Amino acid sequence: MYKYLSGVFLLFISLHVCAQQRATPKIKILLLGSVHFNPSTQDVYQNKQINLTDRQGQVQLEQLLAQLSQFAPNQICIEVPTQKQSKIDSAYQQYLKSQYKLGTNEIDQIAYPLAKRLNLPTVTCVNYRGSFDLDAVTKYAKENNQTAQLAALDQFAAGTAAGIVAAQQEKSITDLFRFINSNEELTKNAAIYTAYATRIGQGSDYPGTDLVANWYSTNLHIYTNILRAIRPTDKSIMVLFGYGHITILKHLFQSNPDFDVVDVADVLKQ
């Protein structure tokens, strides 16, 4: 009888804990992949520069910000290393006082104005710079008769970048964000690593796979930085990051039961 009651009690406790867990609202997270408005010189395949400071650009930007503000994130996470948080805090406070001239990059054009609209105290730095040695992969391919695999990677990546450039020329900034955050484009970008880089290497050598492993490691660290930044009162988070990061980040947050990943298309509606 004692064992029976103990079992019932433990079952009750288990059901109670599960009910409490289910009752806790999930944090909504919007992973907004972006091209870099000012392309990095470190990127092998680059999009064209985006400048939204003219009148037409500001009109388009207003349309984008209006839709993003409806999501109403409690935090906006940006692609800046965590070590630079104090610098970002200072710049943002100057911006709020009209003492900071916005640059043309996506952080200044999107993150700062959106945070101001939402009365957020700052934007949150969550980037992590890991190892990414593409030169070593290229060198290995050339020295080990794998130039065909290297050429295939280059052709596919260049074609993907060309598609982004074409979209820049044809679409408004909101439509561009919809495009690059579509499953098709995110999959194309991820395939550069999973379908092409991993082909470089043979026998006991895995230079391409090691490159991809380091890329995953970088994104795992970014994911952890986002988790560390979340406060108990946060109900929704927006992450503004280079769109090449999004596929991995999306997988990580979709596998975390504390989060509800919001589709960009559901926020940036046509």
Image: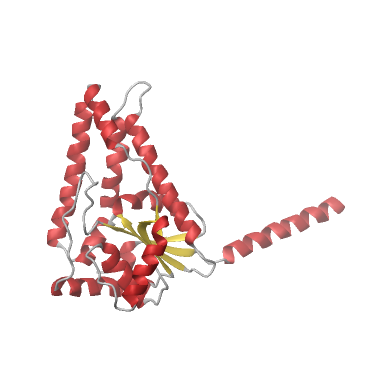
Q: Is residue 221 left or right of residue 264?
A: right
The residue at the point 67 percent across, 59 percent down is: 15
Taking the image as drawn, is residue 268 in sight? no
* Colour mode of the rendering: secondary structure
The residue at the point 15 percent across, 49 percent down is: 162
Above or below — where is 154 with respect to 87? Answer: above
Above or below — where is 168 with respect to 192? Answer: below
Q: Is residue 147 left or right of residue 33?
A: left
- Seen as rendered, the residue at the extreme right is 1
x and y, in percent, of residue 99 in the image: 29, 76
Q: Quadrant of residue 103?
A: bottom left
Count the numbered circles shown.
Answer: 0
x and y, in percent, of residue 119 in the image: 40, 77
Taking the image as drawn, is residue 17 in sight? yes
The residue at the point 18 percent across, 68 percent down is: 52
Query: Quick one: 113 or 65, which is closer to the camera?
Result: 113
The quarter of the image holding the C terminus is bottom left
The residue at the point 33 percent across, 66 percent down is: 266
x and y, in percent, of residue 186 in the image: 29, 51
Q: Quadrant of residue 150?
A: top left
Above or below — where is 72 with respect to 204? Answer: below
x and y, in percent, of residue 82 in the image: 42, 56
Query: Quick one: 219 or 149, which is closer to the camera?
Result: 219
